[in-house]
Image: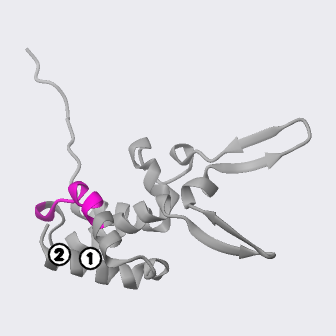
Amino acid sequence: MKIDTIRKVIGILEVVAPEYKGIGEDELRIWVELAEPYVSESVYGKFYHQALAYLTAHKLSLNVPVKKEEENSTISTSVKDTMNVASFSEGSTSISFNNPSTSSSGGSSSADAEYLLTSYGLQFLDICKRCVLPIAISGMQRM
């Protein structure tokens, strides 16, 4: 991956996801490189850097712990840890989980379910819908 591409993506990340400014440039570069195989420059065109930045921010949100200060204690959790449990009760033990694939997401497929977990994933999906044309099979030839 070109260093110019990485710098552009990190620059966009600093604007759209300022909570990750504290992460070192080397670690951000690794996250960008992890997301890069999922985004094609030829498909996304002028939205390439933006799509790569949003996908990187989405993956960071799912995996990198965010520290929260609450009542004299520091809690470190990632979005992935907090968004899976929808409700919890203790008496007679009841727990339910979020299932983004069953949410009313306006026609999103279960393949897109992971992207519905963060606002960055939703932005990435929006760019995908603008740039990626779905393949439609209209039927079979009669014999």
Q: Residue at x 23, y 73 (%)?
A: 49
Q: Which residue is mark 1?
A: 9
Q: Residue furthest left?
A: 143
Q: Are marks 1 and 2 in contact (CB under 8 Å)?
A: yes
Comparing 120 with 17, the one in front is 17
The N terminus: image quadrant: bottom left
Magenta residues? 32-42
For label 1, the crowd category at 10 Å Cα-Cα, with few meaning under 14, some 14 to 19 and many 20 or more, is many
- Secondary element at image label 1: helix
Residue 40 belongs to magenta span: yes
Q: Is residue 108 left or right of residue 65?
A: left
**Residue drawn 29% across the image and 59% down it:** 35
In the image, taking residue 8 as reference, residue 99 lies left or right, namely right
Magenta stretch holds residue 71: no
**What label sits on residue 98 in the rendered view?**
none
Quarter of the figure with the C terminus? top left
Quarter of image, res 135: top left
Q: How far from the left and from the top, in percent, is residue 29?
A: 28, 70
**Element marked by disc 2:** helix
Query: Which residue type carries mark 2?
Result: Thr
Residue at the image point whose x is 43% and y is 67% from the top: 120
- Residue 5's label in the rendered image is 2
Expressed as whole percent of the image width and height from the top left, the position of residue 79 reads 56, 60
Residue at the spot x=28%, y=74% of the render?
50
Report the front residue among 35 and 139.
Answer: 35
Residue 103: where, in percent of width, then height? Answer: 56, 49
